[in-house]
Amino acid sequence: MTVADKGTAGSTAPPAPTGRERRQHRRYRLDLHASPYLYIAPFFVLFAVFGLFPLGFTAWVSTHEWSLLSDEHVFVGVGNYETLLTDPYFWNALGNTLSILLLATVPQLLAALLLAHVLTQRLRGQTFWRMGMLLPNVASVVAVAVIFSQLFGRDFGLINWVLDSLGAGRIDWQAGTASSHVAIAVMVAWKWTGYNALIYLAAMQAVPREVYEAAHLDGASRLQQLFLITVPMIRPTIVFTVIVSTIYGLQIFAEPQLFGGGGPNGVTGGASRQFQTLTLYLYEHGFNRGFQFGYASAVAWTMFAVIVLIALLNYLFLRRIRSAS
Amino acid sequence: MSNRPTRAALAAVAAAAMVAAGTAACSGEDDGTITLSVGLFGDFGFGPLYEEYTALHPEIKFEERIAEFADHHTGLTTHLATGSGASDIEAVEVGYISQYTAQPDRFHNLLDLGADELEGQWLDWKWQQALSSDGGALIGLGTDVGGMAMCYRTDLFEAAGLPVDRDEVSALWEESWEDYVAVGHQYSAATDGGFFFESSGNMFRAMVEQAPEGVYDRENNLIVESNPAIGEAWELTVEAIEAGMSNRLQAWTPEWNAGFNEGTFATIICPAWMTSYIETNAPDASGLWDIATVPGGAGNMGGSHLVLPAQGEHPEEAYAFIEWLTAPEQQQKVFESTGNFPSTPALYEDEALTGLSKAYFNDAPVGQIFTEAAQNVQPQYQGPLQGDVLATIGQGLGRIEEGAQSPEEAWAQVLNDLESF
């Protein structure tokens, strides 16, 4: 409305601007230039306070011998990082994290792709199926972890009961390295497969029907259509889901923590640290007996570097596929 | 300029939010009532006592916050360090008390609030445990003590051809833990590999608690490697593990809980508080569990204090409450309702306590059993990270149970892990 007012005022004979009008004009220009920034400011202010500042502060803390229990903060430079890189438990945690990441992400994304492919077909009760996909994702991580921990129970777990009645014998899921990784990966996959399927589904809707029709005429099977048409055409979405899943997968915490139970095994990820992830390792040092925030901060930054590195590798890898095809 | 009012409204909302955030931090109600928050791990059986106290003092109300055992203590440490978030009254288990007596300024000194006149009310060692190292401050009042006994499944003992009567069972291992393990061998052989006990960590801990010195000496040095009692306890526990006696259960997990009802293991070390846990966890096993004495003499496992963090704003009211709550009359009521055994010796002469028996445990005379257990306890010094040290050793035993390491490897890793303490 103000713009319209000014427009009509400008089209008639322009009188010499009075002091009041000049002020108004300045305010208008200020409004024009500053307001957009003001509108987007809340996000950036919040991000600065709760995102950027803690990030920087964590870096600062990570260069100190900094415990919650003591008021003295001794500067140690890269000392925490040196200790970290020479700690075999750290490398163990990194290995566990990568193993769980692979076990959880690869089958999960493949399953999501297949599910999305099925959901693009004409089905009865389409909305029902699509909503059903999302349900596991709505459940709280803690609830999922608690229930699955019971399912994977050694003596009275449902899965062992089934295995036993099939004659396959019981598995002490928690005790073994591989078995515990599988159990945790199942929890992650159960929660995120449907979510990724929906994202793929959305991307698939944008692929022109004509391409499929042409392929169909050429005699391509459904599966060929999926891998030769759909996958190449939704590649940006695949890149997105791979990177997001990787970031999530590298930060897995609640699942192994609850899987380990309430005692010390929940902190170390089993008595042999067989399923201690990086975040659990961070938790062990930062929020356990010593409350070593300095060391935990160093873990956090190292994790950040690992995540960036792996996301970058993923990206380069997926780009290579594109240029190859 | 239609956006002017909007902005003004936004500013008003923001300002209101800030004011609201500011006032929310203040506690205390306008009508003169005071709400005391009580932070516990598990149910201490205080429920009816809150009501009783509120009936006596209508201005005091209670809010109970229950957390899981380890989370409770980690949370308390965090809240103390950051100066906010702790309850007015917090429970501290004996494995953690030394960690807090080392920083007495974070708590209200109960000697200044009236506890100085009550010293004789508790077992001497219970009182000592809550004193700061210089003796100038008392941070907590004792609730229960965990004099140990041994709970066993009569049906499983019978099936294994072992005696069922509690005196005869006590006699089996009266002398030592070696005898207990010998009975375990017998049990395993008779039941074709049945599990004799639930977890090796618990057995190890019970043996250590009975020794004159535990994992710390009085100067707070870790003596895990040099204390012969620990080496012996480790060896014997390893023997039991290698004989397949352990059910390899981790305490407080669903599997462990189910084990009580299903009878997957035959014995479990039973401090007084464990009896109520068994009773609530295995309601269907009534009459199947019984209580004998623990091998190797008396010892204490567990038990708690109530402390008042200095950040609490109502020290007088909170103190008046915990003084009342830990007085013999109330401890007696807690014992009757939950089984947590009183730490006040005045009751040990009282027929009302010593005469109590529990129908669930075949009418075992729990009052008498646990009175004797508590009276015979030779107090052991508990160091600052007592709970964590025992947990670390327990994990070492866990690695042997899982078959992940040999006993030698596990022991080496325990010592290595303890170096970072």
Image (cartoon, rainbow, N blue to C red):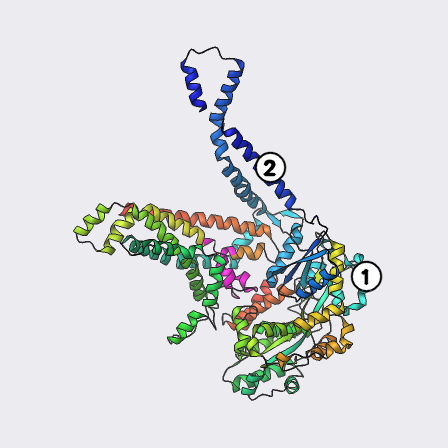
**Residue A284, image x and y in percent?**
56, 57
Q: Earlier in the sequence, mark 1 or mark 2?
A: 2
Helix, strand or loop at mark 1: helix
Q: Position of residue B311 (x, y in %)?
A: 70, 51
Residue A253: say if magenta.
yes
Q: Which mark is residue B116?
A: 1
Q: Using the image, name the chain to which the residue with label 2 belongs.
A: B
Q: Viewer-proximal residue, B420 or B321?
A: B321
Type of the residue with mark 2 = Ala
Towards the viewer: B132 or B340 = B340
Residue A260 visible in image: yes
What chain does mark 1 sit on? B
Q: Quadrant of the N terminus of chain A?
A: top left
Image height check: is B230 above or below A283? Answer: below
> Are the two marked residues, 1 and 2, in contact with CB atoms closer than 8 angstroms?
no
Residue at the extreme left: A218
Three-letter amino acid code at the position of disc 1 = Asp
Quarter residue B16 falls in:
top right
At horizontal 55% and vertical 49% (from top left) the residue drawn is: A297
Instruction: Identify which residue, B207 or B319, lies in the foreground.
Output: B319
Q: Which segment did they paint magenta?
A: A250-279
Q: Nearer the viewer, mark 1 or mark 2?
A: 2
Residue at point 33%, 50% (across, down): A201
Side of A209 where B304 appears, left or right: right
Residue farthest right in this picture: B117
**Does A282 sit left or right of A213 as displayed?**
right
Residue A198, numbered circle: none
Seen in the picture, residue B115 relative to B5 is either above or below; the reply is: below
Residue B78 at x, y percent in the picture: 63, 54
For label 2, the residue is: B15
Secondary element type, mark 2: helix
